[in-house]
Amino acid sequence: MDGVLTADLPAHVQVTRAINPLQAQRLAQYAVYNVLRIQRDMAFFENLQRERKWVRPDAPQ
């Protein structure tokens, strides 16, 4: 945490600390979830599902 606090951050950036271990675990899980969501292009599949299109992403259209 000290490394973040000594970094040159803009004045509008807020830094908080998770004191509760369960809260820290949940924040870490949320971060991993969002990284995997972007990496696996889940928005693409959600759009297909919403449009009721069931195609493989690598199949020619």
Image (cartoon, rainbow, N blue to C red):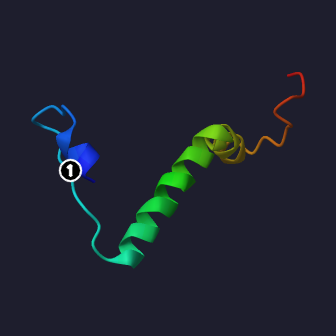
User: Observer-nearest residue: 36 or 25?
Assistant: 25
Could you tell me the amino acid type at mark 1? Val
Residue 25 against residue 52 in the figure, above or below: below
46 or 38, nearer to the observer: 38
Establish if 20 lies above or below 48.
Answer: below
Residue 8 relative to residue 56: left or right: left
Going 27% across and 54% down the picture, which residue do you hit? 1
Q: Position of residue 37 (x, y in %)?
A: 60, 46
The residue at the point 86 percent across, 29 percent down is: 58
Displayed quadrant of residue 39:
top right
Pick the front one: 44 or 36? 36
Q: Which residue is mark 1?
A: 15
Q: Residue 22: percent from the left, percent from the top? A: 41, 77
- Which corner quadrant of the image does residue 17 belong to? bottom left
Residue 14 percent coordinates (x, y) = 17, 47
Q: Residues within 10 Å of mark 1 (few under 14, many from 20)?
A: few
- The residue positioned 71% from the left and 41% from the top of the image is 48
